[in-house]
Image: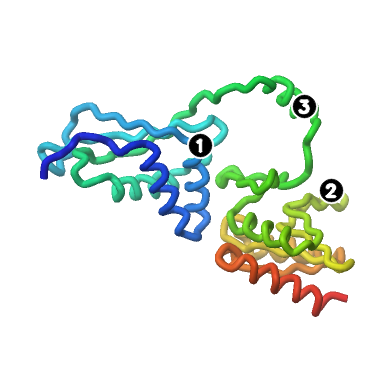
Amino acid sequence: MSFTYEFPKEDDLLYTLSSVLMEHDDDDSASLAWLLLFVEIEFSSFGQYSFRRWDEYLAYMHLHAPMRLVKFFSDTLKTMLLDLVRELIPPNCGYWIESIEVHPRLEKAYNDWRDDHLKMIVGEGLNNQASFQSSSHPMCEYKGIRFRSKSERALAAHFEDSGVLFFPLPLAVCGAQRKEPDFLVCQCGRWAILEVVTDHTHPSVEKEADRTNWFQNHGVTIRQYPAKECLRNSSEVVADFLSWMERNLA
C-alpha cells in the first residue's frame, strides 16, 4: 500500500464523527457529538515511526475548544473519540493517531459583549431553569431552554406540540431544601412530574427514593421513563404520560 501522507479534511472528519455518534442513543455519544460542534481540529506529526509499519508515522490530534467546554472532555470521551478517529482515518493516510489532546482557544468577541456580560454579572436575565448543572456532562439547548440530555430535549419538543403547560427543569424550593424535577406538567389543573431516568442524572436508588417522597409529600406525583425510551419514542412517551395523568389524577 502506498501512503498519501495527507490528513482528512477537518469538516469532513467532524461531520462524519458527528453523524456516527448521533446514531447511538447513549449519553456519552450525545455529549461528544454536542462538544464536537464547537471544536477546531489540527493534526501534528514529528517524523516518528508508528512501529506498525516502517513507513507509517505517529500523529497527534489536537482539539481546540472554548475554555468553558474543555472540562467536559473526560478521559472516557477522549478514548471514545480516539477509537472512532482511528476507524475513520483512511488506511492509506500514512499516520497512526497516537493520542488526542484538548486545548482551550480564544473565542471571537462580538460588538456588545461588554453590555451582555455586565447584565449577567449584576443578575439581569438570570433564571432558575436548569440551575443544577453537571460538571461532567454539558448542557444542550432547545429554543433557549437548557437540558441535560437529548432525551429531555426530545420530550420538550413534543410537550410543546401537545399544547400542555409544562415547566422544564424548574427549581422547586421548600424551606432550605431545593429539588429540580425534569418536567413539571399541568394538565387541566392536574399536576405531575415526568422524570427521565439515566445513570448520570439519577445514579442513587436511595437518593431517588428520598427525592420521590419529597415531591409526593407535597402532593405532586412522579412518573418515570428510561432515557433511551424517551429518545427513541419521545412522542409516545409524552402521549402515555398525558394519558396516565388524565386517567389517574383527580
Left or right of 16? Residue 46 is left
Q: Which residue, given by chain and number where applicable, does mark 2 sit on?
A: 176
Which quarter of the image is occupied by the N terminus? top left
Q: Secondary structure at mark 3?
A: helix
Which residue is pictured at 59% across the width and 68% down the height? Answer: 233
Distance from disc 3 to disc 2, alpha carbons, whole Å, reads 28 Å
Q: How is the image coloured?
A: rainbow
- Gap between marks 3 and 1 measured at Cα: 25 Å
Task: Looking at the picture, tell me which residue is in the foreground, 186 or 160.
Answer: 160
Tell whether 141 sits left or right of 162: left
- Nearest to the eye among marks 1 and 2: give it: 1
The residue to which callout 1 is attached is: 38
- Relative to the observer, which residue lies in front, 166 or 207? 166
Q: Position of residue 229 (x, y in %)?
A: 58, 68
Q: Is residue 141 left or right of residue 31?
A: right
**Dot 2, crowdedness within 10 Å: few (<14), some or many (≥20)?**
few
Going 33% across and 45% down the picture, which residue do you hit? 85
Q: Is residue 210 visible?
A: no
Task: Find disc 3 in the rendering and name its residue.
Answer: 119
Say whether disc 1 or disc 2 marks the residue closer to the N-terminus. Answer: 1
Question: Which badge, 3 or 2, comes first in the chain's sequence?
Answer: 3
Q: Quadrant of residue 235?
A: bottom right
**In the image, residue 196 above or below residue 239:** above
